[in-house]
Image (cartoon, rainbow, N blue to C red):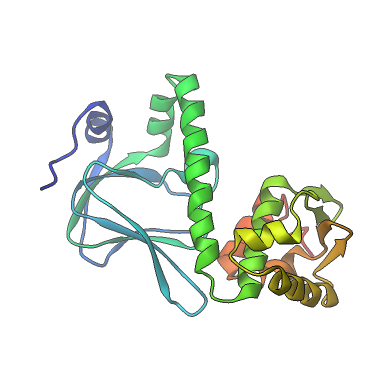
């Protein structure tokens, strides 16, 4: 049986946070926006999942008592179309972002390490998201956009991927054959969405490529690449 959270972090949440209760099926937080605070569960469970274009649910994991979420705001972004839903009557402490930031900044070295851990955890989670897509075109678009956001070189309105990310390497990373990736790249190239220049993939139209996915995911990638609704056209 799970016991109530304890320790220094729990004390911080209980002293400076706000206690809230959610009914079974109630949403605590919607993806695509930065949270106003961070939650610690006192009792109950919170399910984390994403929805695809067909509103099909993909379960990521479940948080229980003493666990804290979401932490992606530490990196300055939110992870796409992610939902946090109470699995039963759930009591949480909501701590303002500024309070937790101040607490973490008391030890800058530890905070930098935490950032690294969260970044790597987020990358594993995005890989799960990537592989959940049913169709090759969606898997490939997601992967290229992710690589562009992390490693792409922006030149005017184009984004160049490092040549180290070959078609075979991309195929291996999303559980597709090299031939399937090649066919999808040919399709995108015919549409003017991207170009394959030797061993390098160049995104020519970030909007068209992100439209292969849902709108929320596309918006995240525009932001990561420094493109806004004002300059992406």
Taking the image as drawn, is residue 144 in sight?
no
Residue in the foreground of this view, choosing between 60 and 226: 60
7 sits to left or right of 123: left
Residue 102 image position (x, y, % from top left): 42, 26
Residue in the foreground of this view, choosing between 133 and 19: 133
Q: Which picture quadrant has residue 175?
A: bottom right
Q: Is residue 131 above or below residue 44?
A: below
Taking the image as drawn, is residue 189 in sight?
yes
Q: Residue at x 38, y 43 (%)?
A: 37
50 sits to left or right of 208: left
Q: Is residue 217 above or below residue 67?
A: below
Residue in the foreground of this view, choosing between 96 and 52: 52
Residue 119 image position (x, y, % from top left): 52, 41
140 sits to left or right of 103: right
Q: Is residue 103 above or below residue 69?
A: above
Q: Among all residues in the image, which is located at the extreme right?
A: 198
Q: Among all residues in the image, which is located at the extreme bottom?
A: 54
Q: Residue at x 27, y 37 (%)?
A: 17
Residue in the foreground of this view, choosing between 214 and 181: 181
190 sits to left or right of 108: right
Residue 114 image position (x, y, % from top left): 46, 32
Position of the C terminus, as image quadrant, is bottom right
Q: Residue at x 68, y 59 (%)?
A: 170
Q: Count the marks: how many?
A: 0
Q: Residue at x 24, y 41 (%)?
A: 66
Q: Which picture quadrant has residue 13?
A: top left
Residue 195 image position (x, y, % from top left): 85, 65
């Amino acid at each position: 049986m799970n016991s109530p959270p304890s320790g220094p972090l729990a004390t911080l949440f209980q002293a400076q946070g706000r206690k809230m209760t959610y009914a079974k099926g109630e949403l605590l937080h919607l993806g695509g926006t930065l949270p106003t605070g961070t939650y610690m569960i006192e009792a109950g469970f919170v399910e984390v999942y994403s929805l695809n274009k067909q509103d099909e649910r993909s379960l990521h994991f479940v948080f229980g008592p003493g666990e804290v979420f979401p932490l992606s705001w530490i990196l300055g972004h939110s992870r796409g179309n992610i939902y946090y839903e109470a699995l039963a009557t759930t009591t949480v402490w909501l701590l303002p972002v500024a309070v937790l930031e101040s607490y973490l900044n008391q030890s800058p070295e530890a905070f930098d390490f935490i950032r690294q851990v969260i970044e790597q955890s987020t990358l594993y989670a995005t890989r799960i998201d990537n592989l959940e897509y049913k169709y090759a075109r969606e898997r490939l678009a997601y992967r290229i956009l992710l690589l562009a956001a992390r490693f792409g070189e922006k030149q005017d309105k184009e984004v160049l991927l490092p040549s180290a990310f070959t078609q075979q390497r991309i195929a291996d990373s999303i559980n597709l054959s090299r031939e399937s990736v090649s066919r999808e790249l040919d399709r995108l190239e015919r549409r003017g969405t991207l170009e394959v220049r030797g061993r390098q993939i160049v995104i020519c139209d970030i909007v068209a490529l992100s439209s292969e996915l849902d709108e929320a995911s596309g918006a995240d990638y525009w932001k990561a690449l420094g493109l806004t609704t004002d300059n992406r056209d």
